Image: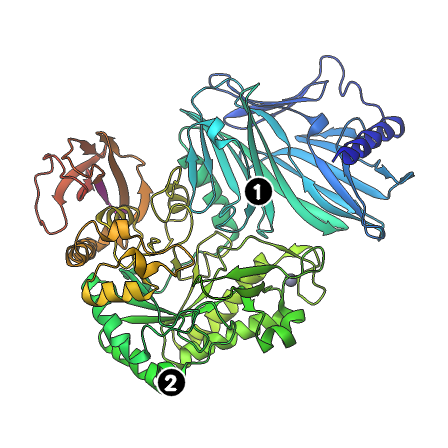
Amino acid sequence: METMKKTIILLFALCWIIGPKNHNLFAASEKFELKTSEATLTIDQKGNLKVVQNKGQIVQINASINNLWKITLKNNLNNKEYQFAPDKNFTIEKSGNVFRLIVSTFSAENKTLPVKAEFTISVKADAFCFSGSLKSDSGEWIFKELEYPCLPGIFSNNKNISIYWPQGLGTCFNDPEVFGSRSLWYPSAMGGAMQWFSVNSPDAGIYIGSHDPSQATKVLNLSFTKPDKAFTASITSPIYGNDFQIPDMMVKSYIGKWYNASKYYRGWYDKNFKTFRSADWVIDDSGWLLAILKQQNMEVMWPYKDIDKLCDIADQFNLSTIGLFGWAVGGHDHLYPNYPPDNLMGGRIELKKAIERAHKRGIKIILYANGKIMDTSTDYYLYNGIETIVLKGNKQPDIQYYIKQKNSTPVIFAQACTGSEVWRRTMFDLGLQAVSLGADGILYDQLGVMLPELCFSNNHDHHPGESDSRYRLQMIHEISQKMKEINPGFIVMTEATNDAIIREIDYFHGWGLGTAEAQNAFPELYRYTFPELLATQRNPNPMITRTEANFAAIYGFRHEIESRYPGDVEYLLHGTLPTAGSYANVAGPPSLLSQMSLVPAEEATKYVHLLIEFEKLNQDFFRHGKFIDQEGIEITGSNVVAKAFLNGNRVGVVVWNKNEGARNEFSVSVPGYQLKNATEPGKEKVDASSPLNANTVRLFVFEKNSL
Ligand SMILES: [Zn+2]
């Protein structure tokens, strides 16, 4: 690290000597200025870059063009890397409303490199747009990465700050110190599911987002520094190439709540991507029962003929879909990507017949496949691995271990790259198999979850150093299109969502922040931006608590029950409460006994059934309504949550009293709308003004006043 610092200092010194000197950028009285409807950006003669909001004169950004960017160049011959920052090695041009910063002096290894960079600042779509291009005319020197724009001094004189950060389905931090310093790799649910974030004071905000229609991998950075009580933001683009067109990095000042930032991003998204809609049956789906038929240690819990019993259980909960995991020879998380039906569990014919019987009962069946990993013990890895795996920068595989039982040897997987045509074909064939077995869909696990790992393989469709994220979309598209030709109702699922794949995935298995209650989780962020999202809650238990069921309902998530271990099977079949011993050999997180012991299985099941019935009765909102969070809704009361769904001239507001033990007074209204009725699960009519019972949801239907 110390050596790196010295190198950078030395480079700056060289640049100072070689580069043109721009001590004063403009004449003394002159400054560069750009305006949007809400803010002004100025660059003064010292290079100070400020964004000031028009109303209230709030300084939203206090930066400098003297540290606006960082470039890392790599010498391909000796693999050495050099970092560059502006210092004084640039010239500027102002033409019309474009501020241009041109850098033509890059020196390293005692020579001037044939490398140029140009950065522009302009106004686009009522925001400040930071763009530009990088070019290296040398085969020897490539751009490794660019960090730009680097914007310190964000909200330096405001106190009440909320940070909206797109990890998982979203997070919200009201304490900048708790937020600290964070980075997210986009696109992935494990990292950033969208390429924007916002920092808000109570009535104004600043939006920072990449408007890159290629949705290429990038890193969103935001950190809070205590001394100046300000944030520093930047976006890092991995490049590994000679040319780079910097996508529009947008900085937008706005008045009001975070909804405005979300709408701004969605407005851009809609201009660049087609509209999308899932299959009708998914929109009306109530949720799924996920069952691992055979575990990693080859223990069979549900042979194919017992799919009938799974249908019985799904019916008890009012769930209309079953996801079969561990349904093939190797069991769960073993022998991927080999998924032949298992003769031990009944064989192919038995499986097909069981699926047909499920269909007769109106239950859909989804088959599991993993879209991202292969078991290294398979012939597939041995013979196809070099063509299909992600190769990291050191040309080694990306290895993951999965272990389900403490007394088993961990199974070793290598990450596959969807940039490999061979891998995409393998996944395609699994789709065809699922169709031929009569399934209603296939779930390719991990496509939405996994970080966009940079892959340096020379065998893939991407260039070395690019992640496979855009090929994940391509793979899903190729499979979905073909399978829907054969069976129009056939769907493609994956675990976890992000906005690079949402338009090709029909149904998401919930994963990560926001799919269950968690500190700082703020699923409103993604749900509001992408109200089309169809996802299950994440509930890795054979029962759903009343709290988790209500949580899912107010966000419009579909419900989930999981059967993963023998203790779960006993509970689901007979209502037998497992003991800690039931999960003693489980290596991962066991089912939560504390939750399962809250109420008898029958009672818990009944509530989920009743709640889903309530959602079906009010499908105009829970299934077909557009999630609008609390926009335009007025709610008072403590520990009550209200979420609204818009449908035509009506708004359904679902209010949840989160108190576990006490009734709660509250009020809800929608200005410009009139209350039509109020209902609760199992109660067709309730007094709208009566207090809400503990841990209870109530739906208020409002209709727009006629003019
Ligand atoms: Zn690759």
Segment colored magenta = 646-655
Q: Amino acid at mark 1?
A: Ser
Q: Can you give x and y, in whole percent of width and height, for residue 696 in the image?
A: 17, 43
Q: Is mark 2 within 8 Å of ligand 1?
A: no
User: What residue appears at the point 76 percent right and 39 percent down from the top-left corner?
Assistant: 117
Q: Is residue 654 magenta?
A: yes
Query: Is the image coloured rainbow, by chain, by secondary structure, or in one colour?
Result: rainbow
The quarter of the displayed image where residue 314 is located: bottom left
| Side of 225 where 307 appears, left or right | left
The quarter of the displayed image where residue 602 is located: bottom left
Q: Which residue is mark 2?
A: 347
On screen, 613 above or below 107? Answer: below
Disc number for residue 218:
none
Q: Can you give x and y, in whole percent of width and height, for residue 643 in the image?
A: 28, 41
Disc number for residue 210:
1
| Side of 420 where 308 appears, left or right | left
On screen, 371 above or below 466? Answer: below
